[in-house]
Each structure stands twice: as structure tokens, then as C-alpha cells.
Amino acid sequence: MHPHVNKNEGVFPSVCSLDCPDQCGLLVHKKAGKIVKIEGDPEHPVTKGAICNKVRHMTDRLYDPHRLKTPLKRIGKKGEGKFVPISWSEAIAEIAERWSNLIADNGPESILPYSFYGNMGNVNAEGMDRRFFHRLGASRLERTICQSAGSVGYTYTMGGAYGIDPEETTETKLFILWGINAVSTNMHQMMLAQKARKNGAKIIVIDVHKNQTGRMADWFIPIAPGTDSALALGIMHVLFSENLVNEAFLREYTVGYKELEEHVRQYDPKTVSHLTGVSVEDILKLARMYGTTSPSFIRIGNGLQHHDNGGMIVRTISCLPALTGAWLDKGGGAIKSNSGFLTHNTHALQRPDLLKNKQTRSFNMNQLGTVLLEAAPAVHSLFVYNCNPAIVTPESNKVRQGLIRDDLFTVVHDLFLTETAKYADIVLPATSSFENTDFYTSYWHHYIHLQQPIIEPYEESKSNSDVFRLLARAMGFEEEALLESDEELIRQAVDHKGNISYSTITYDQLLKNLYVKANRDAFSLSSLPTPSGKIELYSKTMEKEGYPPLPTHMPLVQEEHFPFLFVPGPNHNFLNSTFSNNQKHRELEKNPIVHMNERDAKKLDIDDKELVRIWNDRGECQLTVSVGTNVLPGVLVTQGLYADLAGDMHLVNALTPDRLADMGGGATFFSGRVACEKMT
């Protein structure tokens, strides 16, 4: 038995490992050494026992008969999915031999790791893996697919990933959920908002799709994709022109408010209405509500930043709370991400000092297809973990063309034979988070969690940490940093004198309590980590780096010859491609659909529930249409990334561009254009 695994029977505290801001406290029920039920921990101070279907049905995933049990070696063609079982010693030996030969012939930069946060445990997502690939000297990966554009934009304004404590939003009187389907992707923020609504709060949702969150709002405002910065600037115009700004706050805590006041004169309601599709009356109503209701809170969503102008959109919205002084009120301000409070000692965890060649090349993960097909010198080996790029990465057809290369040696470490794993030469079975030692840091609430193993590793599965320790030995690496235990990695990561939030956090305290709240003193309006120490409405840094120094509406890249903007958002029961292969979740989501405005449907002679073909120069897919008023004319919205099944044409990321956003190398999933027609 694993030395840290608890006894076979009972109820054990745990934490959700999914890439979700809520990071719920869990109670895991065991019988005869197996997990039989997962429920929320009612004692958790934020999540309070409520969990989503994804976690409630997690046992179906943990014990799915299709879960990988042993290492596999490909015997068929790439993509065919034909493999035979092999031993761990055979698998590790083959990987080490192939890599040693590649390094001898082409150098270590011919090898590329590809990963993201399919497991949010810091040790297994960015610990021993980073150490190993640094020591190997492999090409580096810019992990920018999710939040990087908005993070850069928000940081220009506020200096870092700091917002209000979500626990305080029970005091909020006006919620603006902007570009976030919180019911599906931040359910506890929605629960807090509903609690506040019982005390008179109003909930406004601004989005391109009237999804579940939009339907629950007091007021839903539909907006044209990629025009959110224009709407924010229109709100600013009204706030200044109608004297609804807090001038005392602006004088004390900001720089550039006079320049901003002059700048936003051009964004009058009529101009902004033309850009956004939001009526003049609604722009005025929204601005006046925001300017006169306190405390007001903006939850800035992920969807906004997945545009060509995504960084500037978030940069612009993040200026709004300063105009009204909302930051001074309990329950007032904004949250884009709160990860700054729990930023651990990444240098100690990842050990970048192990990388000898500091000029080692790097690739943006959003452009994997281009990298595999065009990089010079070529990438000859790919190691994929915590990620499924054959479905998740933009321009998926190009990605698959790269994965099918005969001269590409691919290893995939996962729980299932994913779409990406079908292209692999070697497939390794991965543990779930309930089988690992790890620590978790929320990017919404302010708690850090320790996870100890609840169950033994499933069949022959191994954690990411264990795999990279095995590979280090097989490659002959002798550095102590590559041999250290998961516990040692956690101790080093939480020993972080550079982040004042960790002044209340130690490993021993986590061991005792399992979760600890960060010290909020890391965020002070009097000393923000911006160059000026204040909220930067005018940013000299942006000016130096070639951006407009004041928030500005920047139009999307025009793919002129396709009539629809295409927004492939998340759905309720999957998390990206995770769970899309599990029967229970497929049944809950049913078949994938595309939402179309009734005016567009009438023009194209398309009826509700018909099968339609959606295409552009990058690819095509076939989906069932839902006709109505949930999206504006000229916009198509889908929800969810569906696993490949025989004959399915549901690969929505075949249509998405691999262009990079304006900031941070972010993805532009939501800025592509498509055509649509009924299937004949």
C-alpha cells in the first residue's frame, strides 16, 4: 500500500483537481479501497458542500472500463488506435533510447513537451516535468492557451492578478458578469450572487450568447463578439459626462484619469451602439446603474480574452471600478483572476536554473500545428500530458497533420486513449488526482489546498512526477532536484518569502488543516505592483511596448469572405475535452448544437433542429442547429468539445484560427469566421 494512502473504508477530505476557478473542497467516500461516492465538503468556507455534475459523477470516470491500465506501444498506423500492452521498463527504455538518439543527431531542442492544466495540481502540472525538461534542454512551451492575454491586459491596469475576495460578494449590490457563463464555469460565484440578490442585488450578464447564466440574470445584454472594450469605453463616456465618477478616488489612487476623460469623448453612446449592437438606451441605463449602485462588482470572464483584441478588452474593463471608486467598498471592485494571492515559489518548484542553454527556443502552444509542420530545425518528438491537443488546440486539422508525421516520435501520458493518444508511439497510463500527493492554488478564492492520496494508483498508472523521475534515471541524470519527493517539492514551493500572502502558509500547517487562506495584505490600493504604484488608466509601459497607452477599442481581424463570427464556448458537463469521452456526461449533454439567430436562419432557409454544415478555409464540421434569439444576427455559438466518435464531424477547433491575440501570445478561438448551410 502507498505509505500515504488512508485506510480502505471511510470518508476522507479532498479537493477538486479540475481547471476551474472554484476549486471545491470535497468529501470522498471509500469502501473496500475504492471510491464509491464524492460529495462537497459542507465545512469548506467558500464552496460549502455544493459541487457540479462533473465531480459528482467522477467515480464513473475513475473506474471507466476504458481507462488505461498499462503502457501501450503502437502497432497500427498513427491515428488508427491500434496498440499492444508493454511493461513500464520497456516503455521507459524505448523513450530514453529514442531521445538519446535524437539528442545525438539533432540536439535536445528537437524534443518538445506539450501540456496544460488537465490536472491543476502544481506538482504534477508544473513541477518535476519542468525540472526534467529544463535538464534535458528540450524546446520550451509557451503555455498561453487559456488566460494569458487577459492576464497581461489586467496587469497593465492593476499590476497583477489581484481582485476582491469572492467571499465578500454577498455584500455586492450590482453584479456584472461579463463574458463568463458562471453557472457552468464558476458556479459558486453565481451562488454568492444569488444570495446577494435575496438582499436586493441585481445581476447583469453581458455575453454573446444567452446561456444558462444569461437566462438567470435580472438583465441580459447581448453584445457583438470582440466589441466589449467599446462597451466599456461607452460606459466611461457616460460616467464622465454625467459626473458619475469618484474624482477623489481617481486623484488618490490612479494615474491618467484626465487623459482618459478626454480620450473617451469619442466613444459616445451612438458610436458605441453601432459597434456593439447594444442600444443607446441600454448603454445609458447600464452606465447609470453602474455609476449609482454601490457596492458594484465586475466578474471578468475568460471568454473575452479569446479574441484578436482580448488583452485590450480585459485591460479596458479593468479600468471601470477605478472610475466609481468601487474598490473601496466591501463587495466592490473586480475579479479577473486572484492567482496573485497564491503565486507559489515557481523558481523553487520548476528549477529553471537546470536549463543550461538560456537561449533555448520556445514555441507558442496555440500554434502546435504550424510548429509540427514548419519548425526549422524540425521537432522530432512530442511528449503530451495533462492535455489533448488533437481536440483542444486551434486549427485542429493542421495539428493532426503534424501528429501523423512518421518522423515524429510521440509519447502521451493520460488516463484514456484520447484523440491525441491515438497518434502516439507510446502511451502511458496516468493516475487521477485522488492517487497523488499535490497542492492546489485557486485562481478565484484565496485558499491553498493539500491533496494526499485517497486511493492506490489504478492498475499500473503512474503520476507525472513518477514518470519524470523514471525518465531522469533512464537518461542518466543525477541531479538531486530530479530525485526529490512530491512532499519535498511542495515544501519548497510554499516556502515563498517573495509573496506576502504566504506569510500565513506552511507545509506543516497544510498537513494539519488541508487548506489555508492566503494573507490578503498582498493587495493594497496604496502600493499596487504597477510602475506607478497606482491603478494605471494611462500606461507608459504599454506605450513603450507599442500599445495605445489608454484603453482603446481595437477591431477584430477581418476574414471578410465568411459571413458569421464563430464562438465555440464551453458547455455545462465537460471541461474542454475532459469528460467528453465518458458515457454519463455524453448523455447529460446530448448532441452538440450550434445556436443561430432566427433572422439568419430565415435568410438561409434553415429550420430549427436541422443538420447544418459549418466551414471555412481551415476545415468544416456538421452540427444540429438551434434557431432562436439566443445570439445576435451574424453570430454562431457552439458549446463543448466533443470526443471523436466513428463518423462524427464535431471538431469545432478545426475552424478556429491559430492567430495570436494582441497580448501574452493568447489564443483567438472566438475571432474566427465561418459560413453555414443546411445539409442536403
Image: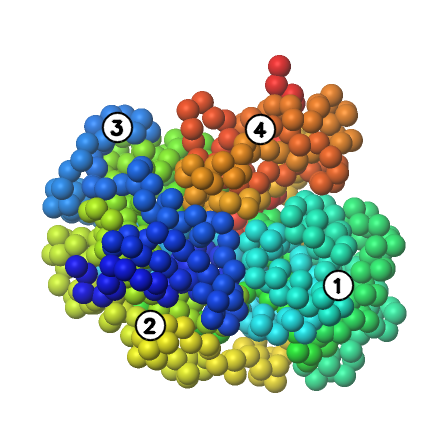
Q: Secondary structure at mark 3?
A: loop
Q: Which residue is mark 4?
A: 623
Q: Which residue is mark 1?
A: 202
Going from N to C along the chain, the mark reached first, 3 or 1, is 3
* Kind of residue sitting beneath label 1: Lys
Q: What is the quadrant of residue 568 in the picture?
A: top right
* Kind of residue sitting beneath label 2: Ala
Crowd tier of the residue under label 4, counting other residues whose Cα lies within 10 Å: few below 14, some 14–19, many 20 or above: many
Q: Residue furthest top?
A: 680
Crowd tier of the residue under label 3, counting other residues whose Cα lies within 10 Å: few below 14, some 14–19, many 20 or above: some
Q: Disc 2 and disc 4: Cα gap in Å?
A: 45 Å
Q: Secondary structure at mark 1?
A: strand
Give x and y (percent) for residue 305. 59, 54
Q: Disc 1 and disc 4: Cα gap in Å?
A: 36 Å
Residue drawn at (19%, 61%), measured in percent from left and top? 2
Q: Which residue is mark 2?
A: 493
Going from N to C along the chain, the mark reached first, 1 or 4, is 1
Going from N to C along the chain, the mark reached first, 3 or 4, is 3
Q: Secondary structure at mark 2?
A: helix
